[in-house]
Image (spheres, rainbow, N blue to C red):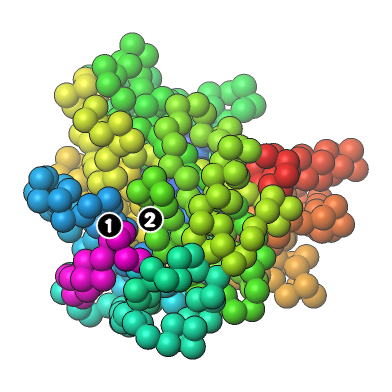
Amino acid sequence: MTIYFRAVPQKGEDATGMTLRQAQHEAFDVVVIGGGINGTSAALELAATGYRVLLAEKSDLGNGASSRSSRILHCGLRYFETHHPVRTFARSPARLLGAVRMAKAAMESRAELVRLRPARCKPFTMCFPLFQGDDIRGWHLDIGFALLKRLAPSGPPLDYRRVRSHLDREIPFAADLRDRTRLKSVATYREYMIDWPDRICVDNALDAERAGAQLRLFTRASLRERTSDGNWLVDLADGSGDVETVRAGVVLNLAGTWVDEIMPPGRSPNQPLVRGTKGSHIVVRLPERYRGYGVATLHRGGMPFYCLPLEDDWFYFGPTETAYDADADEARTTGEDVDFLLGEANHLLPGLSLQRRHVEFTWAGVRPLTFDPAQPMGRRTREIHDLSARGMPGVLAMTAGPVQSHRSAGRELRDAVARMLPPSGEPVATEWGTALGAPDPRNAREAYRIAVREEHARDLRGILYTRVGDGWGRHLDRNAAEHAAHSVADLLGWSPAKLNEQVETFLAFQQQVFPKGDAA
């Protein structure tokens, strides 16, 4: 297939080569608000289809729930995991149908991402221990995996089996599991980790830009009003004090947890679209016998609980699930969260005897689930909302879009836009970008400079976490931060004082957002 890419815009230009001042009053087919995994996927799909697209993000790409997710590319089993599954689904056929629909989407997304992003999807063997007297029985999983296989028969294999004997020989860490006298079997199957979802956001956005989309990062978008010709006026504030106004036939509100804040003056909803729930995680080092494995179960509160491989001997336990109404940027793992996660980890794997001093660091994110008065913790089904009934025709929003199904979310949003507005241009052939991966230490300086020159990075967080990935899996020390800062100071115009300020800001960010367990 021939690939047609427009030139990457230079500083001060948009994707057409026009200066930002010249583009101030441009009209777009679609303005996408939110640079997370779903916003960038939608921008890519729309731009490739021929829509004139502007993507606005209030901070940097992938800085919300996308980068703080549990990172598991799961097969869809978690949608059937609940206390008393047979009784639950028998009483609510609608819930069963929803679970089947989400599981099918998970299997399809799993197949698509493994095919398109093999370097970003790392396989491992998941183990689900089954105990006598527990709600989840072996035959539940047998039926569940038979159904999953039928939902997506052409994807990567599930490799499902149940180990009933010689557990210590078959499962290297079996001796660490609880209640060995009640342990009946261990189900094993193939899962994948999405090791760097924020980098996928970057690749999506860059591919959208090459297809003609404009990117405005560190720019807060707000809806002003709908004009008589059916277009929306969207104000763009980049923090400099200037406000640009652009016009759009359709607006996609894909701001995740902040969806309900993107409303025109006087249009506050009677009921929110988003129900935020916080998921916290703790990272520990585990022995060699855990390499290549993960563990899935239901914690004592009845929700899915995992031990998952992060990198090398780093593993994490989580997530929690608690209601969260504050600003998602301020979500942190609390001491109570750490105690809960350690308690459940030690209940599942008492042989590890984990304590707070073993917690290397923690992180928390907020899931933008769908608000439902009947479900206090929100619905997990991905939904597109036409806000016409709320007095906002031409505005669509999305809730509960998982990281792993962002490709199908982008297509679904593209199709929803097509029912409202035809593209003003011709389709542009695109291809998926190639992530940098962890840089060779000898070439780290050039990787940092590419992040600034070609990938819109403006600060150390955007370089070291979002675009290069050095920060994930470990805390970076001052020397590493200073090396990165010196590598890009000339590109960003940082004075010595500004460089030092950036280093201090980055180190404080690590301690605040990814604190050690004894600091929570």
x then y, percent, for residue 162: 32, 80
Position of residue 490 relative to residue 322, above or below, is below
x then y, percent, for residue 11: 63, 48
Residue 313 numbered tag: none
Residue 167 falls inside the magenta stretch: no
| Element carrying mark 2 | strand
Position of residue 342 relative to residue 520, above or below, is below
Q: Residues within 10 Å of mark 2 (few under 14, many from 20)?
A: many
Q: Which residues are magenta?
A: 131-149
Q: CA distance from mark 2 to mark 1?
A: 9 Å
Which residue corresponds to the image point at 62% horizontal and 22% vertical from the top-left?
A: 241
Question: Which corner quadrant of the image does residue 251 belong to?
Answer: top left
Give left or right: position of 383 versus 72.
left
Give left or right: position of 114 versus 389.
right
Can I make out residue 256 in this image? no
Between residue 56 and residue 83, name the one nearer to us: 83
The residue under label 1 is: 135
The residue under label 2 is: 298
| Element carrying mark 1 | loop
Position of residue 359 relative to residue 188, above or below, is above
Mark count: 2
Amino acid bearing label 1? Asp
Position of residue 97 relative to residue 285, above or below, is above
Which residue corresponds to the image point at 24% horizontal and 61% vertical from the top-left?
A: 103
Amino acid bearing label 2? Leu
Callout in the foreground (2, 1)? 1
> Sequence order check: which comes first, mark 2 or mark 1?
1
x then y, percent, for residue 242: 58, 23
Can I make out residue 356 in this image? yes
x then y, percent, for residue 148: 21, 70
